[in-house]
Image (cartoon, coloured by chain):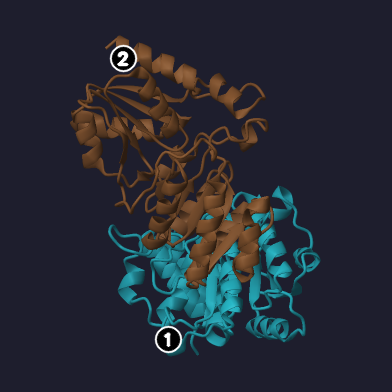
Amino acid sequence: MRAALSDVLVSLSKKDPNILLLTGDHGYSLFDDFRRECPEQYINAGIAEQNMTGIAAGLARSGFRPIVYGLSAFIPVRILEQIKLDVAHDNLPIIFIGDGAGFVYSHLGTSHQSTEDIACTRAIPNLSVYSPSDRFELKQCFARAYEEKAPVYIRLGKADRGDVHQSLQSLPTGGLINVRTGKKAKYSFIATGSMVRTAIDVADKLQIDIDVWSVPFIKPIDRSLVEKICCNSKAIVVLEEHSKYGGLGSMVAEIASTSSPVKMLQIAVNDCFSQKCGTYEYLLEEHGLDFVSVYKNIHSFLMDL
Amino acid sequence: MKFNPIKLRKTVLDMAYAGSTVHIGCAFSIIELLSVLYRSHLRYPDNDPFNKYRDYFVLSKGHGIMAQYACMHELGWLSDDDLLSYFSDGTDLKGLADSRIPGIEVTTGSLGHGFSVGVGLALGAKMRETDQKTFVLVGDGEINEGPIWEGALFSAHHDLDNFMVIVDENGFQAMGKTREIIALDSIQSKFESFGFDAITADGHDEISINKAIKDLWKVNSNKPKALIAKTVKGKGVDFMENDNSWHYTRLNQDSYQKAILSLNESIT
Protein backbone atom coordinates (compact mmCIF):
# COMPACT_ATOMS: atom_id res chain seq x y z
CA MET A 1 0.00 0.00 0.00
CA ARG A 2 2.93 2.37 0.61
CA ALA A 3 4.09 2.03 -2.99
CA ALA A 4 0.53 2.73 -4.09
CA LEU A 5 0.47 5.81 -1.85
CA SER A 6 3.66 7.14 -3.41
CA ASP A 7 2.30 6.47 -6.91
CA VAL A 8 -1.02 8.17 -6.26
CA LEU A 9 0.66 11.24 -4.74
CA VAL A 10 3.04 11.57 -7.67
CA SER A 11 0.36 11.10 -10.31
CA LEU A 12 -2.08 13.55 -8.68
CA SER A 13 0.65 16.15 -8.24
CA LYS A 14 1.88 15.84 -11.80
CA LYS A 15 -1.68 16.39 -12.99
CA ASP A 16 -2.28 19.42 -10.78
CA PRO A 17 0.60 21.81 -10.03
CA ASN A 18 -1.49 23.36 -7.25
CA ILE A 19 -1.05 20.25 -5.15
CA LEU A 20 1.51 20.73 -2.39
CA LEU A 21 2.65 17.90 -0.16
CA LEU A 22 3.44 18.99 3.39
CA THR A 23 5.07 16.66 5.87
CA GLY A 24 5.98 17.19 9.49
CA ASP A 25 9.37 15.61 8.93
CA HIS A 26 7.80 12.18 8.51
CA GLY A 27 7.73 9.80 5.59
CA TYR A 28 11.43 9.02 5.17
CA SER A 29 11.87 7.01 1.95
CA LEU A 30 8.13 7.17 1.14
CA PHE A 31 8.61 10.49 -0.62
CA ASP A 32 11.77 9.70 -2.61
CA ASP A 33 9.84 9.46 -5.87
CA PHE A 34 7.73 12.49 -5.05
CA ARG A 35 10.76 14.64 -4.28
CA ARG A 36 12.41 13.53 -7.50
CA GLU A 37 9.31 14.00 -9.67
CA CYS A 38 7.70 17.07 -8.04
CA PRO A 39 10.41 18.85 -6.01
CA GLU A 40 8.65 22.23 -6.17
CA GLN A 41 5.52 20.75 -4.64
CA TYR A 42 7.19 19.25 -1.58
CA ILE A 43 7.44 21.11 1.74
CA ASN A 44 8.98 19.62 4.86
CA ALA A 45 7.41 21.92 7.45
CA GLY A 46 9.57 20.57 10.25
CA ILE A 47 8.45 18.90 13.44
CA ALA A 48 5.65 21.37 14.00
CA GLU A 49 2.33 19.83 13.02
CA GLN A 50 0.11 22.59 14.35
CA ASN A 51 1.94 25.25 12.37
CA MET A 52 2.01 22.98 9.32
CA THR A 53 -1.77 22.71 9.40
CA GLY A 54 -2.24 26.45 9.74
CA ILE A 55 0.13 26.98 6.82
CA ALA A 56 -1.82 24.45 4.78
CA ALA A 57 -4.97 26.46 5.54
CA GLY A 58 -3.28 29.64 4.33
CA LEU A 59 -2.06 27.89 1.18
CA ALA A 60 -5.54 26.49 0.51
CA ARG A 61 -6.93 30.00 0.82
CA SER A 62 -4.42 31.04 -1.84
CA GLY A 63 -5.79 28.44 -4.23
CA PHE A 64 -3.38 25.58 -3.55
CA ARG A 65 -4.43 22.01 -2.82
CA PRO A 66 -2.38 20.95 0.20
CA ILE A 67 -1.96 17.33 1.20
CA VAL A 68 -0.80 17.11 4.82
CA TYR A 69 1.05 13.94 5.76
CA GLY A 70 1.92 12.57 9.16
CA LEU A 71 1.49 9.64 11.46
CA SER A 72 -2.08 9.04 12.49
CA ALA A 73 -1.21 9.72 16.14
CA PHE A 74 -0.34 13.31 15.14
CA ILE A 75 -2.32 13.89 11.93
CA PRO A 76 -5.20 14.21 12.90
CA VAL A 77 -5.13 13.73 16.67
CA ARG A 78 -2.46 16.23 17.69
CA ILE A 79 -3.80 18.87 15.30
CA LEU A 80 -7.48 18.29 15.86
CA GLU A 81 -8.23 21.90 16.74
CA GLN A 82 -6.37 23.21 13.70
CA ILE A 83 -8.39 20.84 11.52
CA LYS A 84 -11.61 22.01 13.11
CA LEU A 85 -10.97 25.75 13.13
CA ASP A 86 -8.40 26.53 10.43
CA VAL A 87 -9.66 24.02 7.87
CA ALA A 88 -13.05 22.38 8.37
CA HIS A 89 -14.86 25.51 9.54
CA ASP A 90 -14.21 27.08 6.15
CA ASN A 91 -14.43 23.84 4.19
CA LEU A 92 -10.93 24.21 2.74
CA PRO A 93 -9.80 21.56 0.25
CA ILE A 94 -7.05 19.87 2.24
CA ILE A 95 -6.34 16.14 2.35
CA PHE A 96 -4.91 14.83 5.62
CA ILE A 97 -3.08 11.52 5.53
CA GLY A 98 -2.76 9.74 8.86
CA ASP A 99 -0.29 6.92 8.31
CA GLY A 100 0.36 3.98 10.60
CA ALA A 101 -3.11 3.98 12.16
CA GLY A 102 -3.92 1.35 14.76
CA PHE A 103 -1.02 -0.67 16.12
CA VAL A 104 1.37 -0.38 13.16
CA TYR A 105 4.04 1.13 15.44
CA SER A 106 3.68 -1.80 17.77
CA HIS A 107 7.17 -1.54 19.26
CA LEU A 108 6.99 2.20 19.96
CA GLY A 109 4.15 2.32 22.46
CA THR A 110 1.24 4.63 23.06
CA SER A 111 2.69 7.83 21.56
CA HIS A 112 2.74 6.34 18.05
CA GLN A 113 -0.32 4.10 18.24
CA SER A 114 -3.60 5.54 17.07
CA THR A 115 -6.97 4.07 17.93
CA GLU A 116 -9.02 7.18 18.60
CA ASP A 117 -8.61 9.08 15.34
CA ILE A 118 -11.91 8.04 13.71
CA ALA A 119 -13.86 9.03 16.81
CA CYS A 120 -12.13 12.42 16.90
CA THR A 121 -12.55 13.24 13.23
CA ARG A 122 -16.09 11.92 12.71
CA ALA A 123 -17.49 14.65 14.95
CA ILE A 124 -16.01 17.52 12.92
CA PRO A 125 -18.50 19.05 10.47
CA ASN A 126 -17.45 19.26 6.78
CA LEU A 127 -14.66 16.72 7.32
CA SER A 128 -14.89 13.42 5.45
CA VAL A 129 -13.21 10.32 6.86
CA TYR A 130 -11.87 7.58 4.60
CA SER A 131 -10.23 4.31 5.59
CA PRO A 132 -9.02 2.14 2.69
CA SER A 133 -8.34 -1.56 3.17
CA ASP A 134 -5.90 -2.07 0.28
CA ARG A 135 -4.13 -0.30 -2.57
CA PHE A 136 -7.22 -0.37 -4.80
CA GLU A 137 -9.40 1.32 -2.21
CA LEU A 138 -6.57 3.74 -1.46
CA LYS A 139 -6.52 4.87 -5.07
CA GLN A 140 -10.29 5.35 -5.05
CA CYS A 141 -10.11 7.25 -1.78
CA PHE A 142 -7.55 9.69 -3.16
CA ALA A 143 -9.45 10.16 -6.40
CA ARG A 144 -12.59 10.91 -4.42
CA ALA A 145 -10.79 13.17 -1.93
CA TYR A 146 -9.28 15.20 -4.77
CA GLU A 147 -12.66 15.59 -6.48
CA GLU A 148 -14.38 16.59 -3.23
CA LYS A 149 -12.56 19.95 -2.95
CA ALA A 150 -13.29 19.80 0.77
CA PRO A 151 -11.38 18.55 3.82
CA VAL A 152 -10.80 14.82 3.96
CA TYR A 153 -8.96 12.66 6.48
CA ILE A 154 -7.55 9.46 4.99
CA ARG A 155 -6.64 6.85 7.59
CA LEU A 156 -3.96 4.41 6.54
CA GLY A 157 -3.48 1.32 8.66
CA LYS A 158 -1.34 -1.79 8.31
CA ALA A 159 -0.16 -1.75 4.72
CA ASP A 160 1.03 -5.27 4.02
CA ARG A 161 -1.90 -7.55 4.87
CA GLY A 162 -2.58 -8.41 1.25
CA ASP A 163 -5.14 -7.11 -1.22
CA VAL A 164 -8.84 -7.32 -0.51
CA HIS A 165 -9.81 -6.65 -4.11
CA GLN A 166 -8.43 -7.88 -7.40
CA SER A 167 -9.41 -4.60 -8.99
CA LEU A 168 -11.81 -1.81 -8.23
CA GLN A 169 -13.73 0.58 -10.43
CA SER A 170 -14.92 3.99 -9.25
CA LEU A 171 -17.28 4.11 -6.30
CA PRO A 172 -19.92 6.57 -5.17
CA THR A 173 -19.10 8.50 -2.00
CA GLY A 174 -20.47 6.69 0.99
CA GLY A 175 -20.41 3.35 -0.80
CA LEU A 176 -19.85 0.18 1.14
CA ILE A 177 -18.23 -2.53 -0.95
CA ASN A 178 -19.45 -6.09 -0.84
CA VAL A 179 -16.21 -8.10 -0.73
CA ARG A 180 -17.68 -11.53 0.07
CA THR A 181 -21.17 -12.81 -0.61
CA GLY A 182 -22.88 -15.65 1.20
CA LYS A 183 -25.49 -17.62 -0.72
CA LYS A 184 -28.38 -16.78 1.55
CA ALA A 185 -26.50 -14.67 4.00
CA LYS A 186 -28.04 -14.51 7.44
CA TYR A 187 -25.09 -12.65 8.87
CA SER A 188 -23.09 -9.64 7.77
CA PHE A 189 -19.61 -8.49 8.70
CA ILE A 190 -18.85 -4.82 8.25
CA ALA A 191 -15.17 -3.91 8.47
CA THR A 192 -12.74 -1.15 7.63
CA GLY A 193 -9.03 -0.81 6.91
CA SER A 194 -6.79 -3.61 8.12
CA MET A 195 -9.69 -5.62 9.55
CA VAL A 196 -11.38 -6.23 6.19
CA ARG A 197 -8.86 -8.94 5.35
CA THR A 198 -9.44 -10.54 8.78
CA ALA A 199 -13.22 -10.38 8.31
CA ILE A 200 -12.99 -12.21 4.98
CA ASP A 201 -10.65 -14.86 6.38
CA VAL A 202 -12.87 -15.47 9.42
CA ALA A 203 -15.99 -15.69 7.26
CA ASP A 204 -14.25 -18.22 5.02
CA LYS A 205 -13.28 -20.37 7.99
CA LEU A 206 -16.69 -20.26 9.61
CA GLN A 207 -18.14 -21.88 6.49
CA ILE A 208 -21.57 -20.33 6.90
CA ASP A 209 -23.32 -17.83 4.71
CA ILE A 210 -21.84 -14.46 5.56
CA ASP A 211 -21.70 -11.24 3.59
CA VAL A 212 -18.59 -9.15 4.20
CA TRP A 213 -18.64 -5.42 3.52
CA SER A 214 -15.66 -3.11 3.36
CA VAL A 215 -16.14 0.50 4.40
CA PRO A 216 -13.55 2.75 2.75
CA PHE A 217 -15.78 5.81 3.23
CA ILE A 218 -16.64 6.10 6.91
CA LYS A 219 -18.04 9.59 6.63
CA PRO A 220 -20.18 10.42 4.81
CA ILE A 221 -21.66 6.94 4.56
CA ASP A 222 -24.58 5.54 2.62
CA ARG A 223 -26.96 5.29 5.56
CA SER A 224 -29.69 3.59 3.57
CA LEU A 225 -27.31 0.82 2.54
CA VAL A 226 -26.23 0.30 6.16
CA GLU A 227 -29.91 0.18 7.17
CA LYS A 228 -30.60 -2.36 4.44
CA ILE A 229 -27.68 -4.57 5.52
CA CYS A 230 -28.83 -4.43 9.14
CA CYS A 231 -32.43 -5.09 8.14
CA ASN A 232 -31.53 -8.15 6.09
CA SER A 233 -29.18 -9.69 8.64
CA LYS A 234 -29.91 -11.81 11.67
CA ALA A 235 -26.78 -10.43 13.29
CA ILE A 236 -23.97 -8.02 12.44
CA VAL A 237 -20.29 -8.05 13.31
CA VAL A 238 -18.36 -4.80 12.95
CA LEU A 239 -14.56 -5.01 12.85
CA GLU A 240 -12.04 -2.19 13.14
CA GLU A 241 -8.55 -1.55 14.47
CA HIS A 242 -9.86 1.39 16.48
CA SER A 243 -11.51 2.07 19.81
CA LYS A 244 -14.95 0.59 20.19
CA TYR A 245 -16.04 4.10 21.14
CA GLY A 246 -16.83 6.45 18.31
CA GLY A 247 -15.58 4.44 15.36
CA LEU A 248 -17.22 2.33 12.69
CA GLY A 249 -19.01 0.10 15.21
CA SER A 250 -20.53 3.10 16.96
CA MET A 251 -21.63 4.50 13.65
CA VAL A 252 -23.32 1.29 12.50
CA ALA A 253 -25.04 1.06 15.90
CA GLU A 254 -26.23 4.67 15.61
CA ILE A 255 -27.77 4.00 12.22
CA ALA A 256 -29.21 0.57 13.09
CA SER A 257 -30.75 1.72 16.36
CA THR A 258 -32.84 4.38 14.67
CA SER A 259 -34.38 2.25 11.94
CA SER A 260 -33.20 -1.34 11.82
CA PRO A 261 -32.20 -2.71 15.23
CA VAL A 262 -30.11 -5.85 14.99
CA LYS A 263 -27.93 -7.82 17.36
CA MET A 264 -24.37 -6.68 16.91
CA LEU A 265 -20.87 -7.69 17.99
CA GLN A 266 -18.12 -5.12 18.03
CA ILE A 267 -14.60 -6.33 17.31
CA ALA A 268 -12.56 -3.31 18.30
CA VAL A 269 -10.09 -1.96 20.83
CA ASN A 270 -11.58 -2.27 24.26
CA ASP A 271 -10.93 1.24 25.61
CA CYS A 272 -7.38 0.54 26.72
CA PHE A 273 -3.80 1.40 25.79
CA SER A 274 -1.33 -1.30 24.81
CA GLN A 275 0.51 -2.81 27.78
CA LYS A 276 3.44 -4.57 26.17
CA CYS A 277 6.02 -4.17 23.45
CA GLY A 278 6.02 -6.60 20.54
CA THR A 279 5.32 -7.24 16.88
CA TYR A 280 2.18 -6.02 15.17
CA GLU A 281 0.73 -9.51 15.41
CA TYR A 282 1.60 -9.66 19.11
CA LEU A 283 -0.19 -6.37 19.76
CA LEU A 284 -3.24 -7.51 17.79
CA GLU A 285 -3.35 -10.54 20.05
CA GLU A 286 -3.06 -8.39 23.18
CA HIS A 287 -6.14 -6.50 22.00
CA GLY A 288 -8.04 -9.56 20.79
CA LEU A 289 -7.80 -8.47 17.16
CA ASP A 290 -5.65 -11.31 15.78
CA PHE A 291 -7.26 -13.90 13.54
CA VAL A 292 -7.60 -16.61 16.22
CA SER A 293 -9.13 -14.31 18.84
CA VAL A 294 -11.48 -12.72 16.33
CA TYR A 295 -12.57 -16.16 15.05
CA LYS A 296 -13.26 -17.46 18.58
CA ASN A 297 -15.10 -14.30 19.56
CA ILE A 298 -17.34 -14.31 16.50
CA HIS A 299 -17.90 -18.07 16.65
CA SER A 300 -19.16 -17.91 20.21
CA PHE A 301 -21.32 -14.85 19.41
CA LEU A 302 -22.98 -16.67 16.52
CA MET A 303 -23.44 -19.87 18.56
CA ASP A 304 -25.20 -17.94 21.33
CA LEU A 305 -27.71 -16.31 19.01
CA MET B 1 -10.05 61.70 7.94
CA LYS B 2 -11.10 58.07 7.68
CA PHE B 3 -10.34 55.68 10.50
CA ASN B 4 -10.24 58.40 13.13
CA PRO B 5 -9.31 56.58 16.34
CA ILE B 6 -11.83 58.42 18.50
CA LYS B 7 -14.61 57.63 16.05
CA LEU B 8 -13.50 54.00 15.93
CA ARG B 9 -13.56 53.79 19.72
CA LYS B 10 -17.05 55.29 19.78
CA THR B 11 -18.15 52.65 17.33
CA VAL B 12 -16.69 49.97 19.59
CA LEU B 13 -18.50 51.42 22.59
CA ASP B 14 -21.77 51.56 20.66
CA MET B 15 -21.40 47.92 19.64
CA ALA B 16 -20.33 46.77 23.08
CA TYR B 17 -23.22 48.61 24.71
CA ALA B 18 -25.76 47.40 22.15
CA GLY B 19 -24.63 43.81 22.50
CA SER B 20 -23.65 43.92 26.17
CA THR B 21 -20.34 42.36 25.19
CA VAL B 22 -16.90 41.91 26.72
CA HIS B 23 -13.37 42.45 25.31
CA ILE B 24 -13.62 46.26 25.16
CA GLY B 25 -10.12 46.84 26.56
CA CYS B 26 -8.70 44.29 24.10
CA ALA B 27 -10.20 46.20 21.15
CA PHE B 28 -9.07 49.61 22.42
CA SER B 29 -5.38 48.68 22.53
CA ILE B 30 -5.29 47.98 18.78
CA ILE B 31 -7.34 50.91 17.47
CA GLU B 32 -4.45 53.02 16.17
CA LEU B 33 -2.72 49.94 14.75
CA LEU B 34 -5.78 49.06 12.69
CA SER B 35 -6.40 52.68 11.83
CA VAL B 36 -2.94 52.99 10.25
CA LEU B 37 -3.12 49.60 8.58
CA TYR B 38 -6.48 50.22 6.93
CA ARG B 39 -5.74 53.83 6.04
CA SER B 40 -2.23 53.49 4.68
CA HIS B 41 -1.13 49.90 4.13
CA LEU B 42 -3.79 47.29 3.40
CA ARG B 43 -4.56 47.28 -0.31
CA TYR B 44 -8.06 46.21 -1.32
CA PRO B 45 -8.39 46.94 -5.06
CA ASP B 46 -11.88 48.26 -5.85
CA ASN B 47 -12.60 48.21 -2.09
CA ASP B 48 -13.34 44.52 -2.60
CA PRO B 49 -12.64 42.29 0.41
CA PHE B 50 -12.41 39.29 -1.94
CA ASN B 51 -10.12 40.87 -4.53
CA LYS B 52 -7.61 38.28 -5.64
CA TYR B 53 -4.68 40.67 -5.23
CA ARG B 54 -5.63 42.13 -1.86
CA ASP B 55 -3.22 42.24 1.03
CA TYR B 56 -4.10 39.90 3.85
CA PHE B 57 -4.88 41.05 7.35
CA VAL B 58 -5.29 38.33 9.97
CA LEU B 59 -6.55 39.29 13.41
CA SER B 60 -5.02 36.40 15.29
CA LYS B 61 -6.17 37.88 18.60
CA GLY B 62 -9.76 37.38 17.50
CA HIS B 63 -11.16 38.89 20.67
CA GLY B 64 -10.11 42.34 19.46
CA ILE B 65 -12.70 41.98 16.71
CA MET B 66 -14.80 45.03 17.57
CA ALA B 67 -11.89 47.24 16.51
CA GLN B 68 -11.87 45.50 13.13
CA TYR B 69 -15.65 45.74 12.79
CA ALA B 70 -15.34 49.49 13.39
CA CYS B 71 -12.83 49.76 10.52
CA MET B 72 -14.96 47.57 8.25
CA HIS B 73 -17.86 49.91 8.97
CA GLU B 74 -15.74 52.82 7.75
CA LEU B 75 -15.01 50.88 4.57
CA GLY B 76 -18.73 50.38 4.01
CA TRP B 77 -18.46 46.62 4.48
CA LEU B 78 -20.69 46.74 7.55
CA SER B 79 -23.85 48.83 8.00
CA ASP B 80 -25.02 50.87 10.99
CA ASP B 81 -27.61 48.20 11.53
CA ASP B 82 -24.94 45.47 11.61
CA LEU B 83 -23.24 47.30 14.46
CA LEU B 84 -26.28 48.23 16.48
CA SER B 85 -27.82 44.77 16.28
CA TYR B 86 -24.57 43.27 17.57
CA PHE B 87 -25.15 40.01 19.45
CA SER B 88 -28.86 39.98 18.61
CA ASP B 89 -30.29 36.54 17.91
CA GLY B 90 -29.79 35.45 14.32
CA THR B 91 -27.19 38.06 13.40
CA ASP B 92 -23.84 37.32 11.76
CA LEU B 93 -21.23 39.27 13.71
CA LYS B 94 -19.77 37.15 16.46
CA GLY B 95 -17.64 37.98 19.45
CA LEU B 96 -14.53 36.57 17.76
CA ALA B 97 -13.20 36.74 14.20
CA ASP B 98 -15.17 34.60 11.75
CA SER B 99 -14.05 34.33 8.13
CA ARG B 100 -17.60 33.93 6.89
CA ILE B 101 -17.88 37.73 7.26
CA PRO B 102 -16.54 39.39 4.07
CA GLY B 103 -13.39 41.26 5.07
CA ILE B 104 -12.37 38.88 7.83
CA GLU B 105 -9.66 36.69 6.44
CA VAL B 106 -9.33 33.90 8.99
CA THR B 107 -11.48 32.46 11.76
CA THR B 108 -9.69 32.96 15.06
CA GLY B 109 -10.43 33.20 18.74
CA SER B 110 -8.59 30.13 19.82
CA LEU B 111 -5.20 31.78 20.20
CA GLY B 112 -2.09 30.90 18.23
CA HIS B 113 -3.93 29.92 15.04
CA GLY B 114 -3.94 33.06 12.91
CA PHE B 115 -0.17 33.40 12.86
CA SER B 116 0.37 30.08 11.05
CA VAL B 117 -2.47 30.66 8.61
CA GLY B 118 -0.94 34.05 7.86
CA VAL B 119 2.41 32.39 7.24
CA GLY B 120 0.64 30.07 4.78
CA LEU B 121 -0.95 33.06 3.02
CA ALA B 122 2.46 34.73 2.76
CA LEU B 123 4.04 31.54 1.46
CA GLY B 124 1.22 31.22 -1.09
CA ALA B 125 1.81 34.79 -2.30
CA LYS B 126 5.53 34.05 -2.65
CA MET B 127 4.85 30.90 -4.63
CA ARG B 128 2.39 32.77 -6.86
CA GLU B 129 4.95 35.58 -7.22
CA THR B 130 2.45 38.30 -6.33
CA ASP B 131 3.38 41.39 -4.32
CA GLN B 132 0.67 40.76 -1.72
CA LYS B 133 1.64 41.41 1.85
CA THR B 134 0.36 39.60 4.92
CA PHE B 135 -0.11 41.30 8.28
CA VAL B 136 -0.92 39.24 11.36
CA LEU B 137 -1.87 40.96 14.59
CA VAL B 138 -1.26 38.93 17.74
CA GLY B 139 -1.70 39.74 21.40
CA ASP B 140 1.25 39.65 23.77
CA GLY B 141 -0.53 37.06 25.91
CA GLU B 142 -1.22 35.10 22.75
CA ILE B 143 2.46 34.52 22.11
CA ASN B 144 2.43 32.10 25.04
CA GLU B 145 1.10 29.70 22.39
CA GLY B 146 3.65 27.33 20.86
CA PRO B 147 2.51 27.48 17.21
CA ILE B 148 3.48 31.19 17.11
CA TRP B 149 7.11 30.17 17.50
CA GLU B 150 6.78 27.22 15.13
CA GLY B 151 5.47 29.69 12.56
CA ALA B 152 8.22 32.18 13.35
CA LEU B 153 10.89 29.57 12.63
CA PHE B 154 9.15 28.53 9.42
CA SER B 155 8.64 32.06 8.09
CA ALA B 156 12.30 32.96 8.68
CA HIS B 157 13.53 29.71 7.13
CA HIS B 158 11.43 30.36 4.01
CA ASP B 159 12.51 34.03 3.69
CA LEU B 160 8.95 35.34 3.94
CA ASP B 161 9.82 39.04 3.71
CA ASN B 162 6.20 39.68 2.68
CA PHE B 163 5.01 38.69 6.17
CA MET B 164 4.68 41.06 9.13
CA VAL B 165 3.56 40.18 12.63
CA ILE B 166 2.35 43.03 14.79
CA VAL B 167 2.42 42.31 18.52
CA ASP B 168 -0.08 44.25 20.61
CA GLU B 169 2.06 44.53 23.73
CA ASN B 170 -0.43 45.90 26.22
CA GLY B 171 1.14 44.00 29.10
CA PHE B 172 -2.00 42.17 30.09
CA GLN B 173 -3.66 38.86 29.35
CA ALA B 174 -7.03 37.61 30.50
CA MET B 175 -6.14 36.93 34.12
CA GLY B 176 -3.52 39.55 34.83
CA LYS B 177 -0.20 41.10 33.85
CA THR B 178 1.85 39.16 31.33
CA ARG B 179 5.00 39.62 33.41
CA GLU B 180 3.29 37.91 36.35
CA ILE B 181 1.82 35.02 34.33
CA ILE B 182 4.40 34.17 31.66
CA ALA B 183 7.09 36.84 31.50
CA LEU B 184 7.96 37.82 27.94
CA ASP B 185 10.85 40.25 28.56
CA SER B 186 12.02 41.66 25.23
CA ILE B 187 9.62 40.56 22.52
CA GLN B 188 11.70 42.38 19.92
CA SER B 189 14.85 40.44 20.77
CA LYS B 190 12.89 37.19 20.76
CA PHE B 191 11.66 37.77 17.22
CA GLU B 192 15.10 38.98 16.15
CA SER B 193 16.63 35.79 17.47
CA PHE B 194 14.07 33.85 15.42
CA GLY B 195 15.29 35.60 12.27
CA PHE B 196 12.99 38.62 11.98
CA ASP B 197 13.65 42.28 11.33
CA ALA B 198 11.96 43.89 14.32
CA ILE B 199 11.10 47.39 15.51
CA THR B 200 9.37 48.52 18.70
CA ALA B 201 7.09 51.54 18.48
CA ASP B 202 4.38 53.40 20.37
CA GLY B 203 1.23 51.56 19.35
CA HIS B 204 -0.99 54.57 19.87
CA ASP B 205 1.08 57.07 17.89
CA GLU B 206 -0.15 56.82 14.32
CA ILE B 207 2.89 58.57 12.88
CA SER B 208 5.27 56.20 14.71
CA ILE B 209 3.27 53.13 13.66
CA ASN B 210 3.20 54.24 10.05
CA LYS B 211 6.92 54.95 10.04
CA ALA B 212 7.76 51.64 11.72
CA ILE B 213 5.78 49.65 9.16
CA LYS B 214 7.36 51.55 6.26
CA ASP B 215 10.82 51.18 7.77
CA LEU B 216 10.36 47.45 8.24
CA TRP B 217 9.35 46.93 4.61
CA LYS B 218 12.31 49.04 3.54
CA VAL B 219 14.89 46.93 5.39
CA ASN B 220 17.11 45.41 2.78
CA SER B 221 16.79 41.77 3.87
CA ASN B 222 14.73 38.73 3.07
CA LYS B 223 13.58 38.33 6.67
CA PRO B 224 9.99 38.38 7.91
CA LYS B 225 9.09 41.49 9.89
CA ALA B 226 7.89 42.10 13.44
CA LEU B 227 6.44 45.32 14.80
CA ILE B 228 6.24 45.31 18.58
CA ALA B 229 3.60 47.88 19.46
CA LYS B 230 3.68 49.21 23.01
CA THR B 231 0.04 49.75 23.83
CA VAL B 232 -2.32 50.39 26.72
CA LYS B 233 -5.17 48.01 27.35
CA GLY B 234 -8.40 50.02 27.40
CA LYS B 235 -6.65 53.01 25.73
CA GLY B 236 -8.80 56.09 25.12
CA VAL B 237 -11.25 55.85 28.01
CA ASP B 238 -9.61 57.07 31.20
CA PHE B 239 -11.22 54.63 33.62
CA MET B 240 -10.56 51.64 31.36
CA GLU B 241 -6.87 52.28 30.74
CA ASN B 242 -4.68 49.59 32.31
CA ASP B 243 -7.69 48.23 34.20
CA ASN B 244 -7.73 44.60 33.18
CA SER B 245 -11.30 44.13 34.40
CA TRP B 246 -12.34 45.65 31.02
CA HIS B 247 -11.26 42.40 29.41
CA TYR B 248 -14.51 40.93 30.72
CA THR B 249 -16.65 43.79 32.10
CA ARG B 250 -19.83 44.76 30.21
CA LEU B 251 -21.11 48.30 29.87
CA ASN B 252 -24.24 49.57 31.60
CA GLN B 253 -25.98 52.84 30.84
CA ASP B 254 -23.88 54.72 33.35
CA SER B 255 -20.48 53.35 32.32
CA TYR B 256 -21.38 53.72 28.62
CA GLN B 257 -22.18 57.41 29.08
CA LYS B 258 -19.06 57.98 31.13
CA ALA B 259 -16.96 56.25 28.50
CA ILE B 260 -18.40 58.43 25.73
CA LEU B 261 -17.76 61.48 27.87
CA SER B 262 -14.17 60.43 28.44
CA LEU B 263 -13.64 60.00 24.70
CA ASN B 264 -15.15 63.40 23.99
CA GLU B 265 -12.93 65.02 26.60
CA SER B 266 -9.88 63.48 24.97
CA ILE B 267 -10.67 65.50 21.81
CA THR B 268 -10.25 68.73 23.70
Residue for point 67% across, 81% down: B213
Element on which disc 1 rests = helix
Mark toward the viewer: 2 or 1: 2
Residue for point 44% across, 28% down: A198
x and y, in percent, of residue B124 in the image: 57, 73
Q: Is residue A6 left or right of residue A293?
A: right
Quadrant containing the C terminus of chain B in the rendered view: bottom right
Q: Colour of chain A?
A: brown
Q: Residue furthest front?
A: A166
Residue for point 37% across, 64% down: B93
Residues behind callouts 2 and 1 on a single chain: no
Element on which disc 2 rests = helix
**Disc 1 chain ID:** B
Q: Colour of chain B?
A: cyan
Residue for point 75% across, 57% down: B184
- Tag 2: amino acid: Leu
> Is residue B64 something one can see in this rendering?
no
> Is residue B1 something one can see in this rendering?
yes
Q: Which residue is mark 2?
A: A302
Q: In the image shown, does B169 or A246 lie closer to the viewer?
A: A246
x and y, in percent, of residue A233 in the image: 22, 26
Examine the rendered structure and indicate whether residue B76 appears above or below residue A181: below
Q: Is residue A52 left or right of residue B87?
A: right
x and y, in percent, of residue B128 in the image: 56, 79
Q: Which residue is mark 1?
A: B47
